[in-house]
Image (cartoon, rainbow, N blue to C red):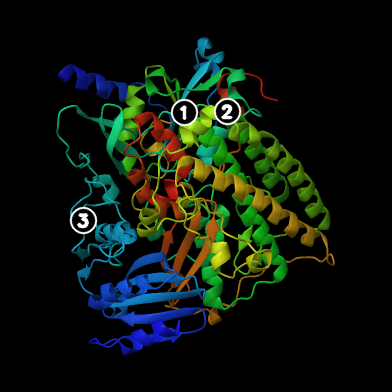
Amino acid sequence: MLNMLLRKSKMGRLTEKGRNSLLLQTSADLPTCFRQSLQIRHLDCGSCNACDWEMTALSNSLYDHQHCGIDFVAAPRHADLLMCTGTGSTQLLNAAHETYEAMAKPKWVMAVGDCAVNGGVFKGAYASEEGIGEILPVDFKVPGCPPTPNDMMKALLQVMGKKVS
Amino acid sequence: MLGLQEYLQSYHSYPAIKIVEWEEQEGLVDVPPRDLPEILSYCLDIRPRPIWLTHVVNDERQLGNGFCVYLVLHFPENDFSLTLVAKGIKDQFPTLSVIFPALNWSEREAQDLFGLQAVGHPNPRSLVLHPGWPLGFHPLRKDYKAGEEHKEFVRAPLVFPEMRGDGIFQVSVGPIHAGIIEPGHFRFYTLGEAVLHLEAQLFFTHKGIEKLLEGKSIEEGLHIIERVCGVCTVSHSLAYCAAVEKLASLEVPRKALLWRTILAELERVYNHVGDIGNMCAGVGLALGSANGSQCKENLQRLNLEFFGHRFLRGMVVPGGMKSIPGAQGSQAILNRLLGLSDDFEEWIPLLLGHEGFRQRAVATGILKTEVALDMGATGPTARASGIPIDWREFHAHLLYPELNVKAIVKQDGDCWSRLMVRVKETRESFRILNTLLREAMKGPEFDYDKPTFMALEEVKRMAPAWGCVESPKGTDVIWLMLDDECRIYRCRIRSASYANWPVVPLTVPGNIVPDFPLINKSFELCYSCCDR
């Protein structure tokens, strides 16, 4: 039991990184094996649904994320990257933590949309954080209200160290 | 509506009923709280049956009114809306949900957010606030200032009814789901494959938007309202602007009304097309979901190209529109839409003729007419269950009276009916867009100036107003009251999803668990504008 607790608390800390830089981290951080294939888990933390629909749009035939080696997976256990939308609503925080902890290392977190980056228009609401960075260690940020599928695609390719035209 | 007025005038109560305002289309009546149930049951007996628009609790203790309950009903026959106001509530009010179950959630929400007690409520469990908040946390009371309480939120188990018996299992799903969808927890009580009962625990994305709106200026408010629901942006902002325009007695020019109607229909088309595709995804019919998502993407690209935003945000402003395309733009939009409508007609027969899909959808997730009526369902959900309610037909607003919109009704109430309602409404919307865009192409070219914001002196203060628009998911209602400085005093957002969510769990029992994705997607409700 104690061991499990220790492991849990450690897992949260190991991947903590700088929070507030808007710059994408260079893909040098990403081991080469992730450059061909990236598995993503989506996490809605109180978004208005617009970012989520834009993320869904990535899978339509006009963007078709799968031909770039990107895929959305059903379980956090299978995911390398957590794409978070929304401000971080209080009633979902526990589930968000658990999702993050369930991911295997190495793992990264991407804040998608203005709300996830800094709370957006919902700054100051009583049941919400100001951005997902308050609760999870964010590695990449994609601003926009909502960011278009193009923005997301570019960000993902950049993370994977691929050329973006 | 003479009968109703006479009834209210002759109603004996102490203190007496006060008819504050009674005009051709709207009435405002002060009613003692304890007489509210009786008056409501009288109203509900009127045929055709009235629909509920919104139920608002407001903290007016600063004005000496105590807590107030506003209930807005709409009588379709005369296009008449009646606001019943119960003032002077201290800490409890008689429940109305026994008479009219549609108000069940609203009253539970009032218990959570205002700390009032709905006396006699059949299911007084907390709704919006999950267990784990500090005791006595009632954020919508005026004396509560948004503070640090969210830091004190602790982990506490959610409460569900127990069910015991041989072979009964509970299957819990969520709040984080497998696909790219919003969070909600579903608990299936199953016996074998069949579902006996379903409990839906929502409000995971509750942020406290209604409190956040308080004290904001009208323009700041619009910015937030547009983001209450990602995909019903136009409907919400139109409803909000309608409320503001009512308070400011603003006339909107015909040209702006025309483009507002076009935006509302564009929103309906891209949502319906996407939702049809999603229903196919719910049964794993890749052909349908691929075509639906592709068609939706093309419609959203059209939005981006001509209106600057894929979800049409920022276009509607109080008093008119931010900008409107000229004759050339209208022609271009029309050409694109004609192409997309042809595309739609090309792939839709592939779904409708697919026997496997049909067999999954027919007789699955049936919503009975009586249930839909009692629970106050709205939009395609209600229309697929044989209830002819369409706000575009009921109420003269935008350019709808000229367009002769009729509610599209199906009788069976199953997933297939909801699909067919959407398909037919999409066709109808393409037709409406065609008519409207042809009108937009005609007429003299003129420069449209964004309306400069109104003179604030003329705006009514401390008076209620509501705005109502038929969104792709049903009727969205925004109820608004401004304070003395013309800032928002209270804004209640009753979205179509909020009205429809309570019926979803009722349609699942009797079906098997794997049918739930299809049933859920056939309602296609939004969590965000329900949770707020």
Tell which tag, 3 or 2, sits nearer the viewer: 3
Same chain for the residues at labels 1 and 3, yes or no?
A: no
Residue in view at x 51 percent, y 69 percent: B243
Residue in view at x 40 percent, y 65 percent: B54
Which amino acid does the dot numbered 3 rest on? Pro
The residue wearing badge 1 is A139
Which amino acid does the dot numbered 1 rest on? Asp
Instruction: Give the crowd class for mark 1: few <14, some 14-19, many >=20 residues within 10 Å.
Output: many
Find residue A62 and report its image quarter.
Answer: top right
Host chain of mark 1? A
As drawn, B296 above or below B452? above
Quarter of the image that includes the N terminus of chain B: bottom left
Host chain of mark 3? B
Front one among A25 and B85: B85
Residue in view at x 55 percent, y 48 percent: B421
The residue wearing badge 2 is A59
Front one among B211 and B169: B169
Secondary element under disc 3, as helix, strand or loop, is loop
As drawn, B240 above or below B363? below
Kindly identify which numbered label has been placed on residue B124.
3
How far apart marks 3 and 2 lie (CA) works out to 42 Å
Task: Tell me residue B32's x, y (percent).
Answer: 26, 80
Whether residues under marks 3 and 2 lie with C-beta atoms below 8 angstroms apart, the answer is no
